[in-house]
Image (tube, rainbow, N blue to C red):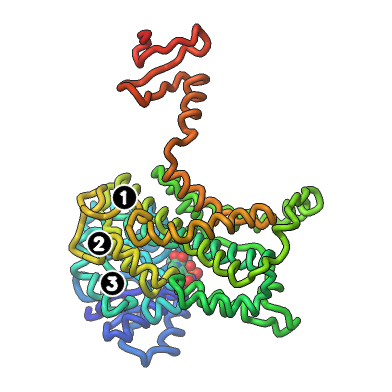
Amino acid sequence: GAADIGVTGLAVMGANLARNFARHGYTVALHNRSRARTDQLVAEHGDEGAFVATETLAELVQSLAVPRRVLIMVKAGAPVDAVIDQLVPLLDEGDIVIDAGNSHYEDTRRREAALAEKGLHFVGVGVSGGEEGALHGPAIMPGGPEKSYEALGPMLEKISAQFEGEPCCAWVGTDGAGHYVKMVHNGIEYADMQVIGEAYDLLRRVGGLEPAEQAEVFTAWNQTDLASYLIEITAEVLAQVDAATGRPLVDVIVDEAGQKGTGRWTAISGLDVGSPVAAIAESVFARSLSSQRAVREAARETLAAGVDEEAQRAPQDTDAFVEDVRQALFASKLVAYAQGMDMLAAAAEEYGWSLDLGTIASLWRDGCIIRADLLDVIMQAFGGRDTSRHPAPGTRAPGQPLNLLFAPEFAQAIAEALPAWRRVVGTAVAAGVPVPVFSSALAYYDGLRADRLPAALVQGQRDYFGAHTYLRVDREGSFHTLWSGDRTEVDGEGVPV
Ligand code: NDP
């Protein structure tokens, strides 16, 4: 065989990735469960490069140069296992099976272990950028055995987005690390979209700005440190007028946000690894709440507003309010990124991955949905991009901040945004405009920097009903108060102190 790579699963994502490889000079063998998609791809785009259409997986495998690279781009879940089961008997030791779909990282860990036993490399790859990205250059987050990257990495780096000459692709870590990093990307994406939504809601309901006016605000914001793909498309969505009604399109779209699961996975994993990704979780909950149509309808009839009419009135100085909201948005967004990076560090510890946070941030600078000027700054805060820097499994690379917010430029930026951030959250609360991520991000910030947390009281309660013991600020060891007895204190062994 002579083809450089085989792609099986030629729906929109697989077809576009296959075309991307071919446009970069690779010979691409094509396969799809039902032949029609293969034929359609060759008929419509066969002139874009060298394609080899195949009918069966056996034919696909035969057409490939060794070591064989087979990229699976089928529906996530059971279909991936079905394809793997058919592929494995056809492959030889050293061949590489790539799953570039949105698989759950635990599935990837399981599949990697199973294929490793057969001498095969299984590489779970996170791909972000939607259909357009897949065709023109996505952000690519490959995991799997590091060795496999020698034969696969250069091809992926060719077809990925390029940021100032650097590919938005680098090996991120073993087994499920690639899919994990992609999942966290999506979690951050949820939060990023939600904070933009909260800013829009405030500008509309408190600031009195119509969608068309806001389109101009967001366009202007795109020239600030908020500059990003999501801010850019927000301006376009807000400027769109519905042809049928002449109303702003955003006003005729049903206010229920859908979700396909990666945000939920991120929130669940945050809980699992003990990382407080509250802003990300709140953005998932905000979508869930939006979808509770019947409950919301009943609530509108049943529940009081109790708002401060003063706060609801349009601010005297609209420009100042707009700037306050911009700063609150920026600070909240930074917190969401800080939480995402924190959970990556926690997951590295949990799963024994060697994750370099600087290099990971570098992958998100272009090609993916959260691409933003800010990501270059975040990358710098974690010591820049260095694809050869592999911290010991479960540890941070030396010199990287314990929390993104500690990077001097970000600590400074937040300090400057804080007065506006607090004003905006206060106004939102008084006016009855829900800002779950603005407010949760601020609570996270205040929680991190608090001298004393009420966790001390919680420990007291836990000791009261469950004898869970507590530590003391002034002595070593653990202690318990005899709550149902004479309320004296004993040490961990039950000996009076
Ligand atoms: P779909 O998720 O809609 O999957 C359709 C493809 O899967 C078809 O090729 C179909 O074959 C194949 N398939 C389904 N079941 C089986 C099976 N049991 N055995 C063999 N093949 C099967 O395609 P997309 O292109 O939208 O997405 C592919 C992957 O990429 C998914 O994991 C998705 O989450 C991920 N992804 C998608 C993005 C997007 O923007 N759409 C962005 C990033 C990732 P057939 O034609 O025969 O039915």
Tag in front: 1 or 3: 1
Q: Quadrant of residue 202?
A: bottom right
Query: Height in image: 371 above or below 43?
Result: above
**Residue 402 got which mark?**
1
Quarter holding the N terminus?
bottom left
The residue closer to the viewer here, 274 or 32, is: 274
Q: Secondary structure at mark 2?
A: loop
- Can residue 77 be seen here? The reply is no
Name the amino acid type tagged 1: Leu
Circle 3 or circle 2, nearest the eye: 2
**Distance from Cα at disc 1 to Cα at disc 3:** 46 Å
Of labels 1 and 3, earlier in sequence is: 3
Q: Residues within 10 Å of mark 1 (few under 14, many from 20)?
A: some
Q: Is mark 2 within 8 Å of ligand 1?
A: no
Q: Which residue position holds label 2? A: 383
Rendered location of residue 277, percent (x, y)? 45, 50
Q: Is residue 307 above or below residue 34?
A: above
Occupied quadrant, residue 59: bottom left
| Residue 32 rendering spot, x and y as whole percentages | 42, 74
Q: Earlier in the sequence, mark 1 or mark 2?
A: 2
Q: Amino acid at mark 2?
A: Gly
Q: Quadrant of residue 9?
A: bottom left
**Which residue lies under the disc numbered 3?**
61
Relative to 171, is 448 on the left or the right?
right
User: Of callouts 3 and 2, which one flags the residue occurring earlier in the amino acid sequence?
Assistant: 3
